[in-house]
Image (spheres, rainbow, N blue to C red):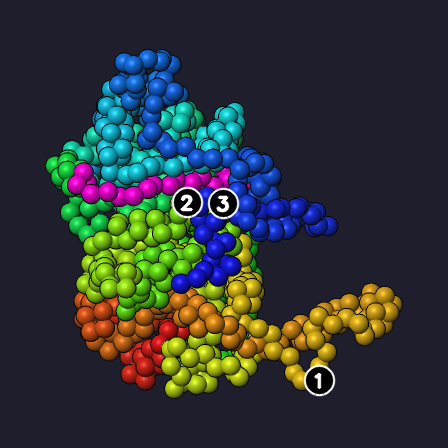
Amino acid sequence: MALTRRDSAARSLLAGKLPQRNMTTWPWGFGVKLEIITPFLGKYRPFVGRCCQTCTPKSWQSFFHKHLPSLGFCNVIQVTEENTRYRGWLVRRFCYVLAILDWKVHSDTPRDLQERIFCSKRVQDVVSPKGLPARGDEPILRTSPAQWRSEVLSILNQIQSPLSLFILRLCSWTLLRLLSRVVHSVLLHKGQLEMVCRAAQTPDVPLVFLSTHKSRLDGLLLSFLLFSQGLGVPRVTWEHQAYTPSLRVLLRRLGGVFLPPGAEQAPDSKRGALFRAVLASYVEELLKSRQHLLIFLEEPFSGVPQLSAPGGEWLALVLGALHAEAVPDVMLVPVGISYDVAPDVFAGSAQPAGLWSCLLAVCRALGRGFGCVRVDFAQPFSLQEYAANNRVRRRCSEKSLEELLLPVILGKSPGLLDWEKSEEWFSRRGAAAELPADERILVGRLGLHSLSAGVSCSAVTAVAIVSALLLHKHREGVFLSRLTLDFSWLAEEILLRNRDVSFSGRLRDLVQHALRLLRGCVSLHLLRHGDVLVAPRETEAAVRELSRHSAALLPVFMCEAVGACAVNALLVEMLPFLGPAHLPADIVLSQEELHRKTQVLVQLLPRDFLLLQPCQSASCYGQDVLDKLIQCGLLVAEEAPGERPACDTARRRFAQKLLWKEMEDFSEGDSDYEEDTSKRCFKISQLDNCPDFFFFLSCLLRPLLKTLERAAAFLAESGCLESELAYVERLQQFLLRKAREDGSFECATRSLADSSVQTFKELGVLREQPGPQGPLHLSETFCVKGNQKRLEKFIGQFASR
């Protein structure tokens, strides 16, 4: 089969020549600089990871290497004698040990840390006789200074322990040997590393790394990586419930820190206040001593971007330290991690990980390969600048999701949505209990901004591309030659959207490498004419693994996927009999109707799932969706017969329209322009690849939308009051029953079930009884069967058919 010109260009592109972005900066009169980016085939990689110019304009101009795309990569686990101070035959045999002994720990825990924390104002306000009185349901606390000191020391030991250099270097050597056996490479961009090193040289300003979370190995991997590159050993946040006490002791000696369980007690509890005071004082002293901190913002094993509650707690503590003037500023560095296959055998286990289970996991990992690992650093930005710019920014037109969408679902208000969804971020628990409402909103915005930056700078792997093609485009099977062509097409589409890939090399070798790593999820059949038939397995484990890998492509095509689902909803209204593979050529879509459908879908989906930055309104996002659909060729402008083409300017009366117009008439002209724009119409493109691309984009959002639709159908089986945990368990069992009927096991994950319940709570479908973790019950509106059917139909219109 002959390659087209575009596919041959993509093949040379994947051989190591990635698109350069020829960037010209044009200043605007409003103080905003625009980047005019012209893509062309060259030897440079795309720009990724720039910080937000709206929220952090000063940081946007700092710490960004001018030649960042042209710099190469370093393999962190490839240690030679060049990484040591010595040379010779014997050095080459012991280069791992000599290199690790040369790594420096630039800052350590102060020796008088316990005394500093006990004498801090936060702790003294709690332990003083005027502090919070003990409640009747808790034991009376000891009041002597020695006993209070012992209590504070016990809490501090639950949070952290001093670093052990011997254990640290021994575990680094063990991890280096293990990684060299189970992965091909751990790649780090030299330009991004130089950017972070420059930020680390800022006087009296510590670094806080805000990372995505793909595996339980992430903490050890990033700590090892920063330690090996001269940035010291960061303090890594770990989940307390995920590990046994013996493993927590080892992790603390390696730099791990934990949220103490007592920090989640009631705000009026004196013991809970003491836990939070010790924790806040510890974070202040940690940042004062310029120790770096690593925080994971994402829920592990979720498969989709989702802000985690522990990540928000740590962010609130860092923000509180800045407000307490413990440090002049904090530099935040978003981090993205990409695995070909995440080396984690605990993903499906509910039991805490222990030392013996970790040893068994290492033994199992030695028997298989996990491909390559890529770590990317986004541009550092100032927390002080971000807080100052966002503290004064408020939205005056906010409504709850129930006020926004419930009238639309019930058919009472089909008009355009001009309001923003009110921000519901973190609950009043732990460190967030000490913050006012506006500060909690600021923490949520900061977490969403950083998570969006971390995901956007993460490179897309070859395994993710092949998994997405097999799951969403070739579910029935595909020839290897056709899969190779589609791989080339999809890789080029990713690069043209200014996103990086984690691979280079010959096209056929890349596809074979991905299929080798996915050997448990696919079946290969050699045909007589020499081609190979690749078919994904229909088992539950195979479908879920393919779905977990393919989720990496959703953030890349999020705008186009939302637009494709909005177009699908309009077609469902006009042509309910239409099949999934047919796109009508003569159907005219109004921009106003398309914008309304897009707005409804954007409001329905969680904001962290969309990675919609807080500084961007839903209306602007909807316009971006329409622009992306036009740019990728799915929609073409429709012009009425007899009208002048939109690009024709030959007969415009320039003097009447612009040159001699009075100043007071400009507003009228703008309204005329908006009225003309709202009347624009579009048709679906009839290019050869348009139906396949349209269906592929719709399928990217299918797992969440299908889960929401089935959760709406589950409302008919909802009984009396029950806890949220029990409701989610029953919902997941219902989703599994539905998945066994059609093989859609990607729609039956725990994370999607949790997200559906949270959406229904915000939508007013489910009500929560007063009190902590009160039971759930159906609202009066949705006790009616007709309204349940309306909700199911409302969500089902966006899902691909």
Q: Which residue is mark 2?
A: 504
Badge 3: few (under 14), some or many (20 or more) residues near its Cα, within 10 Å?
some
Horizontally, residue 341 falls left or right of residue 489, namely left
Vertical relation: 183 (above or below) 625: above
Say which amino acid is labelled 2: Ser
Vertical relation: 503 (above or below) 222: below
What segment is highlighted magenta in the picture? Answer: 365-392
Whether the magenta-drawn stretch holds residue 370 is answered as yes
Give residue 536's position: percent from left, percent from top. Answer: 25, 62
Give residue 209's position: percent from left, percent from top. Answer: 41, 37
Q: Which mark is residue 642?
A: 1
Q: Residue furthest front?
A: 529
Labels 3 and 1: the sequence-earlier one: 3
Residue 766 in view: no
Give residue 220's position: percent from left, percent from top. Answer: 29, 34
Tell me which residue sits at (26%, 25%) in the image: 173
Dot 3 falls on a residue whose secondary structure is: loop
The answer to whether the residues at label 1 and label 2 have Cβ atoms under 8 Å apart is no
Q: Nearer the viewer, mark 1 or mark 2?
A: 2
Badge 1: few (under 14), some or many (20 or more) residues near its Cα, within 10 Å?
few
Say which amino acid is labelled 1: Gly
Badge 2: few (under 14), some or many (20 or more) residues near its Cα, within 10 Å?
some
Vertical relation: 417 (above or below) 116: below
Instruction: Give the quadrant of the C terminus.
Output: bottom left
Vertical relation: 185 (above or below) 649: above
Tell me which residue sits at (60%, 43%) in the image: 57
Q: Which residue is mark 3?
A: 17
